Amino acid sequence: MSPLINISIPSAFTGVALMYEVIVIGVSAGGLHALAQIIPELKKGYPLAVVIVQHRLNDHNDFLAQYLNNLSELEVKEPQAFESILPSHIYVAPAGYHLLIERNKKFSLSVDPPISYSIPSIDVLFQSAAICYQTKLIGLILTGANSDGADGIKTIKEYGGLVIVQEPSTAEVDFMPKAAINSTDVDHIIPLKQIGVFLKQLEFNRVKHE
Amino acid sequence: MLNKIETLEFEVNMLLEAILFRYGYDFRHYARASLERRVLNRVQLSGLNSISDMIPRIMHEPNFFNLFLKDMSITVTEMFRDPFVFKQIRDSVFTQLKTYSRVNIWHAGCATGEEVYSMAIMLKEEGLLKRTQIYATDFNNHSLEIAAKGIYPAGKMKQFTENYINSGGRESFADYYQAKYECAKLTESLKEHITFANHNLIKDQVFAQMHLVMCRNVLIYFDQNLQNRVLDLFKQSLIHRGFLILGDKESLDFSAVNESFDKYQYPERIYRRSAYV
């Protein structure tokens, strides 16, 4: 097994580790509203890292990261190439680049062609994250108008991760969550309002050291 | 027994060794996540069952290897991509370049050449082209052929024009190309000061003293060892106070040459060789 990340664990948890290390979130049309419901729920010291791909125009500003940073108790940023992934941080894929995770738990970027017309692409992040984190990964698909992410969430499931989809009736655009549900036997389908709470309680999910 | 991920890694390693052995191209120090994606994509496109199935084809079919080389080179690029970067080059870097009687510029990893022609257009408009030699290099001959032709899909001209204007272009962009059917051919005169040549950043050396090296979104595909190798090459190639321009999500922060460069215009990732001590 890969070495566990160094996080501050309350004494009651000594000898146990987080069941999950990273949450990857894929979201497209309607994402700003959905993320604004979820992100503020994750409080200071939240022990997982969160990585978000939000489809948007290649406008080369970091508006999205700044917007979420204002809503969040955690630090929100666009990662640079080869930056290490740290717990209690939220990372947003920069516009115009695919964001990937290398096996050494560092980010990498690419300007490969768009996938499902999208760069950054959800599939690209999810599939590289699945290989790196395997059972310690959670994939979440939110509102959106294309099928990007459907392959990625399938890969996460194949490698033993937990996969969650926003309840389509609570999505501003239900195409993306439906595509994910059709591609994969998902673990949970959750209404938007309850996703934040669900992610919050994950920090109490721990496993004994293997 | 090997699990799925170890198998993937092992198969990719074997493939890369086979390529190195057979053709002398060394992809072992590419960032793995993107490379694996491209390899798996090729497996699917060519209807193969596994990465291992690529190996005999690589060994015996040079055309299949060329396909792979092409896979490794396809990236998203535009003329004046990131207009704010080109605007800054025009506004502040050119002011410095104008103090030299001869200027050498190296586009390292120029791919299909869009940024090379963008640079040539700006140099022309600022009265610098005549005294400038542009070296545009790539390891992929297929990309270089496209670059040397200077012919791009006509459908892209709208985006290129918009980028050109946003980068501070003051002329009519339509004067720089002729559209015919689906293609737009850039004006021949732009090529007079450009030399296209094969150069492999992974194994080739410095070939001239440069005033400016432009290498955007190439290093993101390399691991940190290879990045350091290439950055050292740029460092050696640059004159005292020469400029280095990287992609806007790349940086020298984690590199071995960080001390040798100043941040000249940081949001645009324009670096300058530090004064020699």
Image: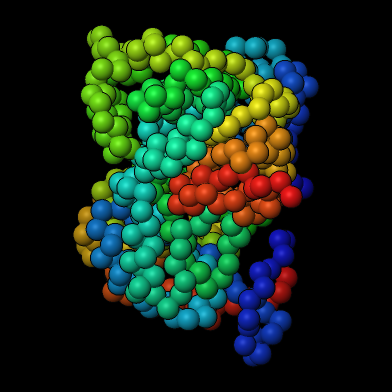
Res B102 → quadrant: top right
* Residue located 46% across and 63% down the image: A77
**Visual colour scheme:** rainbow
* Residue located 25% across and 9% down the image: B180
Left or right placement of residue B264 versus residue A209 in this view:
left
Q: Residue furthest bottom?
A: A12
Q: Is residue B26 visible?
A: yes
Q: Is residue A141 visible?
A: no
* Residue located 68% across and 52% down the image: B259
- Looking at the image, which is closer to me, B149 or A195? B149
* Residue located 77% across and 47% down the image: B1
Left or right placement of residue A68 versus residue B239 in this view:
left
Above-or-below relation of B101 to B94 = above
Q: Residue A54, image x and y in percent?
A: 36, 54
Left or right placement of residue A42 versus residue A103 in this view:
left
- Looking at the image, which is closer to me, A50 or B73? B73
Q: Residue B160, image x and y in percent?
A: 31, 29
